[in-house]
Image: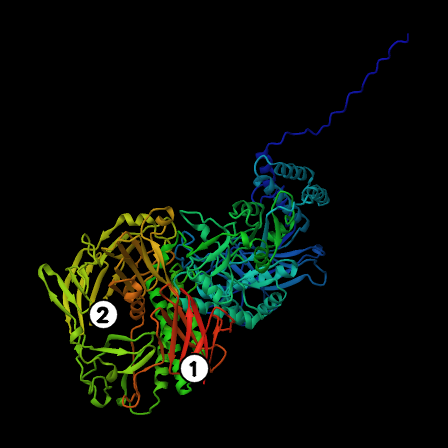
Amino acid sequence: MAASRLTVETPRKVPMEQVVMKHRRTTLERAEKFISNLYFTDVNLYGRLYPKQCEASMITHWAAPLNVYTSYEEAVKQKFAPVEVGQSFGPTWGTHWFHVTVNVPLEWIGEEVRLRWNSSSEALVWVNGQPRQGLCSEYERFDFPLTDNLQKEKCSFSVYIEMACNGMFGAGDNGMIAPPKLDKTFTLNFCQVAVFNRKAYNLLREVELLHDIAKHMPEGSERGYQALYTVNDMINNCDVNDTSSYERCHQISAKFFKQRNGDSQHTTYAMGHAHIDTAWLWPYSETIRKCARSWSCTIRLMEKYPNFTFTCSQAQQYEWIKERYPSLYEDIKKFVKEGRFIPVGGTWVEMDGLIPSGEAFIRQFLYGQKFFEKEFGMTCKEFWLPDTFGYSGQLPQIMRHCGITRFLTQKMSWNLVNKFPHHTFYWEGIDNSKVLAHFPSGDTYEMKGNVQEVLRTAKNFQDKGRSDKTAFLFGFGDGGNGPSEDMIERLDRIKDVDGLPRVKMSTPDEFFTAIENEDSSKLCRWAGELYLEMHNGTYTTHAKVKKMNRKCELLLQHVEFLSCVAMATKSSVYPSVELNRLWKLLLLNQFHDVLPGSSIGMVYEDAHKYYNSIMESGSNLLAQASTNIFLKPCDESDKSLVIWNTVSWDRSEVISVQGQDESESPNKRRKTDTNVNVPQQIDKKGNKLYYVKVPSYGMSDLVNSCIRDINPWSVNAENMDDGVIMIKNDQIEACIDKYGRITKLLVNGSNKNMISSDYPANQFILYDDIPLYWDAWDVMDYHLETRKPVMKLLKPAEIEDNGPLRVTVMVSLEISKESQIEQTIILDVASPYIKFDTKVKWFENRKFLKVEFPTSMHTREATYDIQFGHIRRPNHQNTSWDTARYEVCGHKWTDISEYGFGVAVLNDSKYGHSAVDNILRLSLLRSSKAPDRNADMGEHEFTYGLMPHTGTFQEAGVIKQGYCLNSPLNTQYEHYDSNIVAPSSYFTLDSSQVVLDTVKKSEDNDDTIILRLYESFGGSCCCTISTVLSFSSVQICNGLEQTTEDDTFDIKTTGDKITFNIKPFQILTLKIKLN
């Protein structure tokens, strides 16, 4: 037998490279440091982005005059002087122009070369007289590309840089929302030319994405560890000083990125965006430059990335760019035509969502959509309002009335107490109109395009199963220059990567259409307002702004009505151009950081300048329209007093005519009471009072309108025991204590005291008002725990006037050593409410002044006036949703009622309200110190009313009285012959449910007027309008004044009458062609 052979195996060679058991934290941090711009930049990949650098050849400078706009053409003519890096420039809001000359070294030929500028501020690069690109220090947007491939014959470059002495968020002193520090300076940290290493940049983006996938995928996930090992392998194979090694790294990452998604993945529809506040921590003038800086960046990216899309709202900003930067505007028009620069929103500005009137909302869409149609041949399909402080329950119908069926915002993600339950849903308004609504589930409109945001967008989405699509808005806002190259590169690389949601560069129309086509039947519905549980102090901050807003809204509507009458009856020229200018100024001031009171003081200097312009020009237009109606040339001494009623029902009220100077010659005095044998009253100020009746949307002179026998309705006041004053007319009776508080309030024919037996009404209350951060914006719930009644008397209640037309009671109170209240309590003949004319000297620090009205009502809800209707809200705190609504927005009135009785609080300029149990509170003044340290400081005048009633508030006329308080009878002296011209009503309605809110000329036809009506009670009815204006046809149209075919409307015309049916809270716009 053969012997066995033994085989000896050669030992395997052990590799010198050790296989390391990867520790997740250290590997992630290794990758982070490999691309860090702070750590190890001498040896990492980031440090290779600019391998060659040198200083600019020459920098010269010219300081523009402060607060004066200087165009490029003017600037370059000035004398520039040399400056150096390291110098500082100011002051805040100043403008400095720099001429930068660059001679690039010849050894850089063939390289991508950039100018790098950091002036610690915002800036705009100009080349050959054209605005080319914005720069922004806050987001390290330092680079301006000079060339992608340096050529020998073009190694010298010359650019101008317009430097703004402010940062992206203005110039707050010691905090973002702090008032601006006006003596700030901004340092030129560097101005250099550098080679940009595109290969290092591309590799850096891949390392960044793999790091982020490994970090933000669920811990322990297979895909996350694949990313972790891939990025680690790339770093092991990368020699940052040898660009040939970069290709090996790309091959490693390609194996990961080429693994695609499955069909079930969530899809994010990415759209570039740059939310630019039209004013906020900077004035309007700076916004114009912010738009130029941001949009020029966007145009440059569109030239480089053919699939990049960008959404942009606010017609006002487009108009500014058209006027100031025409070449940039032409570039924008080119890309709008390509469908990549996409106008959205359809409004003049992104306005406040609660405070503007219904008509002002419609004008936002009318002027916005008309601008987009004229300039770009298109109108918007979606309402774009991502950043305002709540959304009226009437907005869905207003949107649809203006041709818009889709809505996008994200602000509801800011709720403090309750998480809103949907991201994609149908929003239903108070009339049942529905729009498709979407809230981007990333909870911001300033995405950076990174992995974490994409994952969060899909994870947060609350309508999974009903939809698998979300919008993804990326780009720096407010001067950060919008989307960046980094963002686009990131999103392109992860558009279809296994483990991540799909990313699709898209448009709003593509996104919403996909939902409508695939998901609409499965979506939930939200009915009523979208209440933001935050920023509810903005209903009150900057009270004068809110007062002027309401006065201007109403004035312009009054001008339009009288101008229509003058046009229809006397062929007068309708002042379209000036009215459009005034409306646009008003709409501008309704921007969502201006009207709410949350901007810096400079903004309100501009805002009040615009308000004053509207009031001055509007008053002149009103007087001119009235004069045009009464064309009778004669001496001024022949003028008589004409009284105009600008609401759609007859009114009987007391008017006050200013007393005449007895030193004035008799032939110069206007006729007021001559031959008028009616009871009159001269008040303490010497004004003459008359009780008049004026027809709806009409006029009369003093002679024909005076009610001669007032004995059945006369009013009187009487001193009672303990300093109590009783005031009484034929409608109501009230008792006033020495503090001006109402202790008893009766409706004639009833012995029910409408006021609480425990607490008096008209009690001023002072609260501490210190929010967590957002000073001008927020009033916190804990302020309610600091209630302090204002009880220090300066002058006790005293009767000033005592009938027969009006009684007045005066009272003065001290709030503090710095602040006082002076109030005139008024009851007029036949008036159903008591009026409180109030003057407040206000110099407080973070205090909140309210007035409260404890009633004897038993109910579980209160009713609030809003745009074209009203809403009911609970007055209890059963749920977290109820407790969060401790301060709410309302317009002209609030009502609390039980069966058979109720109490309403009317106002002429306030928007903050609350109702708890049986108490109504009206918010009067705040005293925030940021971002405007002087907000609300000074003297204020406002009026509110207290109206008890029987029956429902609809039957009692609360809605009408709210209008009447806000639109007093208007008096004009005209050449009016009362023997020839009788009192006239130009429009009369036979239903008290329907309000004719607006009468204006058609935007497009001089022989056509527009009537806008709405149902105000909340129920269906049939209504007939009668008019003395001769017309030939009536058509239904939308808010854009486009004729619509609506089978649900049945309009009948017979002679001078127009009859129609109308549904609850429905808005109806009619186009009437005049003969």
Give the crowd class for mark 2: few <14, some 14-19, many >=20 residues within 10 Å: many
Give the structural element (helix, strand or loop) at label 1.
Answer: loop
In front: 885, or 187? 885
In front: 757, or 358? 757
In front: 819, or 964? 964
Check the image and tell me how it is coloured: rainbow
In this picture, residue 46 sits left or right of residue 806? right
Q: Residue at x 67, y 40 (%)?
A: 234
**Where, by quadrant of the figure, is residue 738 drawn?**
bottom left
Given this view, does label 1 or label 2 mark the residue nearer the observer? 2
Q: Amino acid at mark 2?
A: Ser
Q: Which residue is mark 2?
A: 831
Q: Amino acid at mark 1?
A: Tyr
Do we see residue 987 in this rendering?
Answer: yes
The mark found on residue 574 in the picture is: 1
Quarter of the image with the N terminus in it: top right
Give the structural element (helix, strand or loop) at label 2.
Answer: loop
**Where, by quadrant of the figure, is residue 641 drawn?**
bottom left
On the image, the x and y values in percent for residue 222 come to 62, 36
Do we see residue 40 in this rendering?
Answer: no
The mark found on residue 879 in the picture is: none
